[in-house]
Amino acid sequence: MSDCIFCRIVAGSIPATIVARTPDAVAFRDLNPQAPTHVLVIPAEHIPSMAEADTDRAEGQVGKAMRLAVQVAKELELDQSGYRLVVNTGRDGGQSVGHVHVHLLGGRRMSWPPG
Ligand code: 5GP
Ligand code: ZN
């Protein structure tokens, strides 16, 4: 989708600090980090939100993005201290970009419950 900023990051038509990439998923630094490490991991294919992800195809795409998030966490040496994976969904979930993205947050102790 050409009007989706995350599709444009996948295509390389807008810049991002890419951390890792597979044919199916891309990991890049969040523009406005909320933790010492804040990486977004997205499926390369446009899926608007998790509310649209209840299909066999989306299961594969989201699963691969989640797997890349786990691999990036390991590469950034967060796996011993721990980290948080968050997928905000829809208005009440706080989603502001309409392309599924996993927030990988680490490097500080997270609080619970979320705000
Ligand atoms: P959401 O609020 O949808 O869960 O998360 C969207 C995230 O995307 C936010 O943390 C925001 O900082 C990040 N973001 C929005 N636009 C851009 C962009 O153009 N580049 C990057 N790297 N991050 C972005
Ligand atoms: Zn998109």
Image (spheres, rainbow, N blue to C red):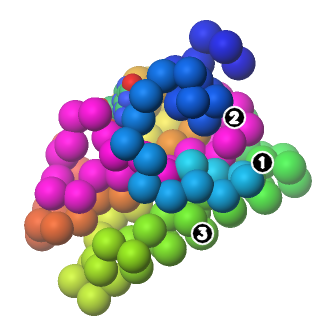
- Is residue 111 shown above or below 80? above
How much space separates mark 2 and mark 3, taking CA atoms?
A: 17 Å
Instruction: Determine if residue 60 is in view.
Output: yes
Type of residue at label 2?
Ile
Residue at the spot x=23%, y=51% of the render? Answer: 114
| Sequence-earlier tag: 1 or 2 | 2
- Residue bounds of the magenta highlight: 27-51
- Asked if labels 2 and 1 touch by Cβ distance under 8 angstroms, the answer is yes
Q: Please give the residue where the numbered disc 3 appears in the rendered image.
A: 67
Is ligand 2 closer than 8 angstroms to the Cβ of mark 2?
yes
The reply to whether callout 2 and callout 3 are in contact (CB within 8 Å) is: no
Mark 2, residue position? 47
Q: Seen in the image, is 10 located left or right of residue 37?
A: right
Q: In this view, does 87 lie to the left or right of 26?
A: left
Badge 3 crowding class, 10 Å Cα cut-off, few under 14, some 14 to 19, many 20 or more, is some
Label 2: few (<14), some or many (≥20) within 10 Å? many
Residue assigned mark 1: 58
- Judging from the image, what secondary structure is the residue with disc 3 in? helix
User: The N terminus appears in which quarter of the rendering?
Assistant: top right
Q: Where is residue 7 in the image (x, y as percent from the top left)?
A: 62, 27
* Crowd class of label 1 (few under 14; some 14 to 19; many from 20; radius 10 Å): some
Label 1: element kind: helix
Residue 102 visible in image: no
